Image: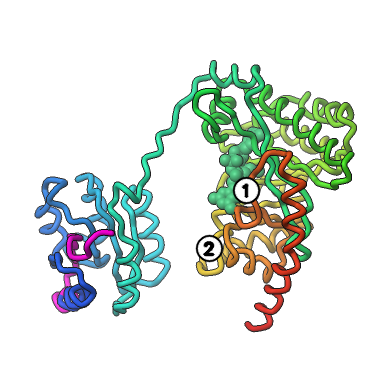
Amino acid sequence: MFEKSAIRILAIDDDPFMLKLLECMLAQQGYASVSTSDNGKAAIESFASPNQAPDLILLDLNMPEMDGIEFVRHLVERQYSGSLILISGEDERTLQSTEKLVRTYGIPALGHLSKPVNPEDLSLLLEKWTPSSLSVPQMSKTAYGAMEVHAAIANGELVNFYQPKVNIASGKVVGVESLVRWRHPRDGMVYPDQFIGIAEQYGLIDDLTRVVIHEAFAQAKAWQDSGLNLHVAINISMDNLASLEFADYIVAAAAAADIKPEGIVLEVTESLLMKNLSTPLDVLTRLRLKRFSLSIDDFGTGHSSLSQLRDLPFDELKVDRGFVHGAVEDSTLRAIYSASLSLAKQLGMKTVAEGVEDRADWDFLRSTGCDLAQGYFIAKPMPAHEIPGWIAAWEAHIENLIENVFVHSLEM
Ligand code: C2E
Ligand code: MG
Ligand code: MG
């Protein structure tokens, strides 16, 4: 633990009364190293070198000379390494988007407070403070080259993990999504964001997808033979759809594995660079005719757009996790989530919510009529052999999950 009195706090507000008030509240809560400033410009000049900067700044957004957002820009220029709490009389949405902006600049924002500031709310945010070096883990990501990714595909180092998808009303497990991992001989487990882009860029994505499909189809057949009835979803890159043969390849692969297209879901995220839509449209429409299910992934992120819904024969919409986790307490997320859901319903599509991370997310979904859920609250992606055991354990506590929610919703 760190001593509260050792945390150097700077409060900035153009209103001297507000500064006095903050100073008193901080003192009462045991924060003794507090300084104040009624002007952002003067404040920024007071810490010219990084070690003169405070550990935490309480910042008013509306100040006449330099507003809070300009102030944040100056902090970035000076490589400020402390945290920030925003304070303002502005509405909640303005505060929320400013907080997001601060985070995109890489400054840890502990949260925001509306005026008049309430001492309990202030105290809760202050408790979130940790030294920045601890709060921002420096995860170094290795950049892999095309040769390495090529070798990984050729040497069989890619392996599919599977994440369960469950029916929200019944709790039943209906399928899994295949998510590729690279078991790197030196670096351990490598996640797709570190090699899918490279595979796409260097023309390796067709080979990669074929490896993934081959393994997923064989797995689907094995589950089917053991009496497990699971849909298997596979992520397809838009680049895979640039060649007309792709549809024939999938049809042939399913036949060779002896599985039915009805049990396979193909998830597609539109890439912004896709210029020629006629080939993907041709491929996807043919796959749909052959009874494969088509799912639009990451809906709402801008990669998946409304025009895709108009042009392509999707039958499932996956609401991006950015609009699911925390939607219950954020009205903006909730609005986007509900709009996506109602759009899908009107178009007769099944809906899947991604990124269900906690009980609050789950309970919220249960009140919205979304069909399927996927996320860490249910299960993380796992190797295929763990799926049957996981399903047994999940089914043993489904009743409890659904019953509790039922009681819960009656109380509301
Ligand atoms: P996606 O298809 O949207 O997959 C969902 C991602 O969210 C997965 O990340 C999954 O592990 C993660 N996730 C699941 N539940 C939660 C949750 O509750 N909270 C949070 N924060 N995350 C959750 P992963 O496995 O790292 O995959 C990232 C993306 O890489 C996938 O996004 C997909 O677009 C792509 N990808 C994965 N496998 C393949 C593949 O075989 N082929 C292609 N082309 N792309 C793939
Ligand atoms: Mg997906
Ligand atoms: Mg997604």
Q: Quadrant of ligand 1?
A: top right
Asked whether the beta carbons under mark 1 and mark 2 sit within 8 Å of each other, the answer is no
The alpha-carbon separation of the residues under discs 1 and 2 comes to 18 Å
Instruction: Say which amino acid is labelled 2.
Output: Gly
Regarding residue 121, the answer to whether it shows in the image is: yes
Q: Which residues are magenta?
A: 1-19
At x 74%, y 42%, the residue is: 233
**Residue 51 position within the rendered picture, expressed as x and y whole percent measured from the top left:** 14, 47
Asked whether the viewer can see residue 346, the reply is: no
Q: Residue 339 lies in magenta, yes or no?
A: no
* Disc 1 element: loop
Q: Which mark is residue 326?
A: 2
Q: Quadrant of the N terminus?
A: bottom left
Q: Which residue occupies 31% across, 79% down?
A: 118
- Along the horizontal axis of the image, is 294 left or right of 259? left
Quarter of the image holding residue 209? top right
Closer-to-camera residue (48/72): 48
| Quadrant containing the C terminus in the rendered view | bottom right
- Above or below 99: residue 232: above
Q: Residues within 10 Å of mark 2 (few under 14, many from 20)?
A: some
Q: Which residue is mark 1?
A: 380
Q: Nearer the viewer, residue 145 or 336?
A: 145
The location of residue 411, given as percent across then percent down, is 64, 83
Residue 303 quadrant: top right
Side of 107 relative to 237 (left or right): left
